[in-house]
Image: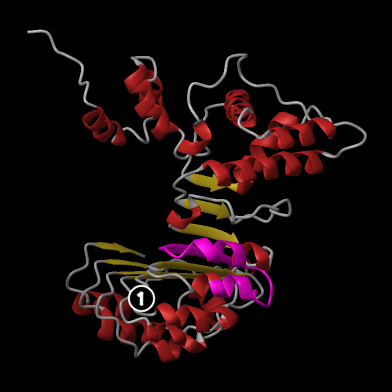
Amino acid sequence: MACQLIADSDSLSEIFEYLEEDKLTLHSCLLVNRLWCKISVRILWRNIWNFKSPCRNHTLRIASSIISTLITFLPNESKKLLYENNIFILPPTSRPPLFNYAAFCKVISTHKINEMVRSILSDKTNFYYSLSDKSGLVTNEIIKMLTSQIYSLKKLDCYRFDCGYINFSFNNSPGARDLLELDCLSTLPSNFFYQLSQVCHNLQSISVNINNDDVSNGLKELISLQNNLKNVKLSAFYNNWADIIPVLTKHSDSITKLHLYSDDDNLPLSFIDLFSNLQEIIFSFPNNFLSVFENFEEFEDFTRDFIDFKKLQYANFPKLQTLKIPFQCPKVEYIIKFLENNGKNLKKLYISRTDRALSLSIANLCPNITSLKY
């Protein structure tokens, strides 16, 4: 009996979901028939910025195809603006697009869009306009179009330091209400966060790169208005996250994952005691001074004492399953005390130091460990 191709749309969709990371197979599915093409193209464009290429020329061809396709969906006023600024990006074909590809996107990554645009404009700069000016203009027009077209936005990434071109709003964004994940800089305009806070109340994950002393009121309001925030990452460089702590504590019952990254090991940590439902904690405090010391003991004497961890060692997190301290560590006695209170339910422990007393304590205090790295 001949094998028949599955024709049911729902069944195909369920099967194709397993191929999300297998871009090559999905591309092959585009050629089978219109139904297979319609299903696979939605998955391919879900996060179109996430692709891997073996060589630079192939990367450039993919980037050019993506950007030129998106240019075809720009409104006439945007196309006119590009034309007036001597920016010419031709569509991939003379035929109209088969689908509204822009509407299939569920991820917006501002820096990846900008990188793609820069790559295809790099040989088209002229005396009057710099590459940064041109790429910023094109990027902003594309993002404005995407925010108006995407019906279900899941992730917004504005995390890199090259976001000075951001000049778009979410006032007419039908998909922002579904946003689940936000990666952002604290230095983005406060109005950007205010506008997003008007429509987005269901964030589950937020990652903030804090690179100034003060966190804007717009960002604080956005965080405050979320209904079910679960995953938080704070990165601070030569600064601190003290200004954002009060608004985070409003979500102390819902947050289950907390990642703190900084080059300063004296930043406040004791506030974590309020988050009783934490299942995962990561303390990332890299120190670049190790290479100037002859041995680890000298380096250990130099490093500070994680003053707030000294307080945190007595905290109790009954649901904690993962603890990672991949760089600098608090004193061994602090960690051992912390494990006395929280080691029973730990399943994953990653700690960047070895010590006999610590190893014995882990063996005695963490009976359910399934993954251990030193």
Q: Position of residue 166 (x, y in %)?
A: 69, 53
> Which type of secondary structure does the marked residue at label 1 adopt?
loop
**Count of numbered tags:** 1
Q: Position of residue 289 (x, y in %)?
A: 62, 70
**Residue lying farthest top?**
1
**Residue range (magenta):** 194-221
Q: Nearer the viewer, residue 190 or 274?
A: 190
Q: Position of residue 82 (x, y in %)?
A: 77, 34
Where 275 sits versus 372, above or below?
below
Q: Nearer the viewer, residue 195 or 159?
A: 195
Asked whether residue 347 is drawn in magenta, I would say no
Q: Amino acid at mark 1?
A: Asp
Could you say which quadrant of the image residue 361 lies in? bottom left
Image side of residue 10 versus residue 68, left or right: left
Residue bearing mark 1 = 355
Asked whether residue 215 is drawn in magenta, I would say yes
> Where's the N terminus, which quadrant?
top left
Could you say which quadrant of the image residue 336 lies in? bottom left
